[in-house]
Image: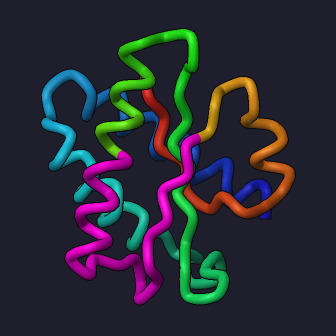
Amino acid sequence: MRKKLISILLLLLGTSFLFSANLPINLQSVLLLRIASYEKNIKSRIVDGQINIGLLYNESNAASKKNMEDIKSELSKLAGKGMKIQGASINAVPIKITSLKSALSEGKIKVIYINS
């Protein structure tokens, strides 16, 4: 399971660098959900009809924190409009970079968005 999560992490890491420079945050949030919905095993990651998306950020970097807050707001708006991943509701969970190891070991985070 950890290998699958890491594969998603690497996919999103690569796309986050592409997104951050040119793509508005509202489009990043839509693409994040669409990319995640195409992941082959995403249905197996749905728990109680919900999928947790970790928003990894650097708490000592104001830009990273603001970006995390912005993407969380956009994901909440999309969830409020009924957007889902493979029928699962979306739950955005901020994760400080210093807490990444514990967040991954708990196994609750299924998709990760990495802030610069």
Q: Quadrant of residue 24?
A: top left
73 lies left or right of 9: left
The segment highlighted magenta reads: 72-94
52 lies left or right of 82: right
Relative to 99, residue 6 above or below: below
Q: Quadrant of residue 80?
A: bottom left
Q: Position of residue 81 (x, y in %)?
A: 20, 76
Relative to 112, residue 89 above or below: below
The image quadrant where one finds the N terminus is bottom right
Q: Position of residue 108 (x, y in %)?
A: 72, 63
Query: What residue is drawn where x is 30% and y is 49%?
Result: 73
Residue 75 is a magenta residue:
yes
Query: What residue is drawn where x is 33% and y is 61%?
Result: 76
Give whichever of 15, 74 is nearer the camera: 74
The image quadrant where one finds the C terminus is top left
Query: What residue is drawn where x is 34% and y is 29%?
Result: 67
Q: Position of residue 78 (x, y in %)?
A: 25, 66
44 lies left or right of 49: right
How many numbered markers are drawn?
0
Query: What residue is drawn where x is 64% and y is 76%?
Result: 45
Give whichever of 87, 15 is nearer the camera: 87
Q: Position of residue 28 (x, y in %)?
A: 24, 46
Residue 42 is a magenta residue:
no
Question: What's the colour scheme?
Answer: rainbow
